[in-house]
Image (cartoon, rainbow, N blue to C red):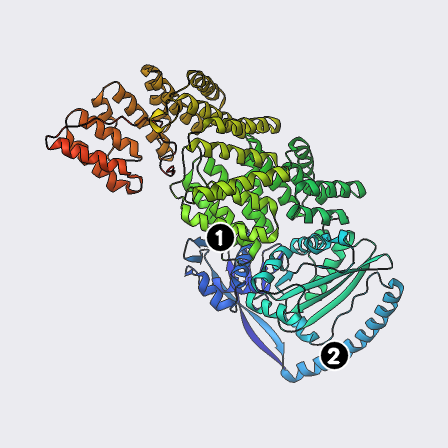
Amino acid sequence: MTITKECVVYCFAEFTFIPDTACLNTTSEQVRLRNKVALLLAYFLQHPNEVISKERLLSELWQHGDFREASLTQSIRELRAALGDDAKTPRFIETIPQRGYRWICPLKLTSKSHHSKSANASKQNIFASTKRLIFMGLCGLVAMSIWSATRYFEDDVTADKADSQQHIQQQVESLIVLPFSNNTGNADMAWLELGLSDMLSVDLKRANQVQIVSPAQGNLLLLEHQISWPTLPNYIRAMLEKEQIDAALVASVRLLKQQQIIDFQILFRDGRVQQGSMSFDNLAANIDRVGHQVFQLINPKQVLTSEHSQPDLSAMAIAQGMQALQTTGALDAKRFFSASLTLKPSLWAKAYLSQTLITLGQWQEAEQTLFHLVNISLEHDPYLDAFVHFLMADLMSKKGHPESNVWIAKSVTKSAQTQDAKLLASSLKLEADQHFLNMNWQAHEAVLDQIDQTFELSTAPELLADKMFYLGEPINSGLEQSPHLDLAENAKRLKKALGFYQTLNNRSQVAATQLAIAQNYGLPVEERAQALIASMQAYRVLQQPYELAVAEMYAGFYQMQLHQGDKAQVYFQSAIDKAQQLDAKNLLDWAQFYLAFAYLDQGLDQSDRGGQAGNPQKLKQAIDLLNQVLNTTSNQIIAASSRVFLGWAHTQTQDFELAHQVLAQALLDTETPAYRITHAYARYSKMYAYLLQQQYAQVLNLRLAQFTTRLEAIYVARAYAELDQFDNAITTLKTFQSQLPTQWQQADTQLLAEYQNANKGGQWLRQALEKAHSVYCETEWLVE
């Protein structure tokens, strides 16, 4: 007897989807979705055109646990990839910022008959099948015994048979790879702990069938749960339950008869255990076989999609290099990756070596290798393809190459296809940085939102550290800064990221975060100074010339805020030397601009602030270098800022015609909202020149209803006072106080009192006029 059932079939665009089978079909192919992805798609299809919050999806489809948010993010990415959907221009799933997701594609529902046997018939069939399975299983055991005897210890794998039926029915969707234990008794093999486990993690991740939590993330999860390592299985299972991770891989490596033996256990959240042992002459060279065996143990019915999914990681040296990249730095990593290529060339070793060469500033060699990798077909390994394009985009960005935007776009596209959050976020960070340097603030914020959505609410510590760093790192660009900048919130993010990176012993990222802390105006000056020194020291030890040059430029800029141009000059010149050696065009433009700024600081009259009276020779050096920068740079903000500085220089030499000429051009160059601060600098610098010329009406012609900086208000009020319009001078200062209360100073209170006294017929004692160059970046920096 059979029973006929009707199952729902959803039709949309070129797809049909049958929830009962989890199959997504087109006319040419059928894709079986992962269980969670199928459930997610079904839920969207059941609620079309509704805005569905993340909280609702988590409540309906996931059990409680911290890891479930990351699982939702991964599932959204997998579903979009399966549909060929683009989050920026969606056809199927639209992201509603701060609210959730919405299915937007029109649907058509049909039904399909499904026949099943009656209960009695099914029982008889199961009984017959069971007898066949028992017989086949006995034959398989005999065959396995014979095969194992011939292999001896090379590939000895055993598995617990308890709860095997449950294991077959329940698919593992997430696995945490915990750091390996080095039981070899050889301290030189410490690379096993993170290096080899990272290799396995990459192998498993690239198969794109199970969500993988890396060893570095696992290390931090152990710390967060206050679990010492190694630990008991019960503690691991408690962590799995809390984080809603399906299973954990625990492994140790020992030596026996010149063989490297990996003993591993897979601890499932539901209490099951799978365990195995594999032996090789070179474990690192056979990590793909370990990964294949792990897949077979966690999901025996799932077949790897392609024989090419195994990584081309060929030697123990690669694992040692990966460990070095995270801990001791790129210089050590280069030795290992170079040794790997000598022993047995592989594409992954070439990619990792290119990464270390970029970090070490050996860009020409890195570029040659990356172009070679880009020009060969990497379709068999999309993860490697995306990684190579990210490295190329990173290199082109550092070099200031005119096609860097093209490479970044390719990197973002390919990284999105891998569904790897860290790689995608790294690519998006390059895109965000480009928008930031171009002062496209709206686009910059949009990409930061994408980074936030990429990580979502992930509690994976390594990803959380990257998220905190990426969102907290943006600072000013020249005289400009993003209007969306939240220094206080960024400071919190950076300190949290720093703690994570320090725990991971990721020295390069520790240095980067310390530099970002130094650049955050919202933190105490002493704390920033200490972070800046620590960052430069780290970059020197790690031998990262590009990052050191960036840090040196900010060290010089830091000294400029204190009007110590002689000290700043040393840092800027050092940065110029590195930029020239690296052939980093953007870096060189900025370093030369800042060196001219340092000359200017020494050449300008600073006597009203207790500084020097001015140095004509330094002033001439500044004018010459600023004109040189204007003739060579294509960077608009550098050009506009250079004209403002030239205006200050020519005002001091009382060449007012030249001063107004360059300042007028600076005003024209900065009329867009993105240049609001530079525009304000140019405007109040012209006001200052007009005040010196006693052309007070010209000052008032430049005034705006909304003040951007303090000096604008001071100069407008002064012009009114010089015209004996003290009531307007008083109104101007009060308006400034209400519009920019954080910039109001004690001297302004005294000035207001003087104008009020003069307005009542009292004597007005003219105070010395504050110079246009008296404060650098006054909107944020207050010298203590």
Question: Residue 734, relative to residue 159: is it above or below?
Answer: above
Question: Residue 566, relative to residue 62: is it above or below?
Answer: above
For the residues labelled 1 and 2, say whether their Cβ atoms are less than 8 Å apart: no
The answer to which of 147 and 27 lies nearer the viewer is 147
Please give the label number shown on residue 199: none
Mark earlier in primary sequence (1, 2):
2
Q: Is residue 300 visible?
A: no
Q: Quadrant of residue 177?
A: bottom right
Q: In which quarter of the image is residue 584?
A: top right
Q: Quadrant of the C terminus?
A: top left
**Label 2: few (<14), some or many (≥20) within 10 Å?**
few
Residue at 10%, 30% (x, y): give it: 761
Residue tagged 2: 130
Where residue 168 sits in the image (x, y, percent)?
68, 71
Furthest residue to the bottom?
120
Give the secondary structure at mark 1: helix
Q: What residue type is labelled 1?
A: Gln
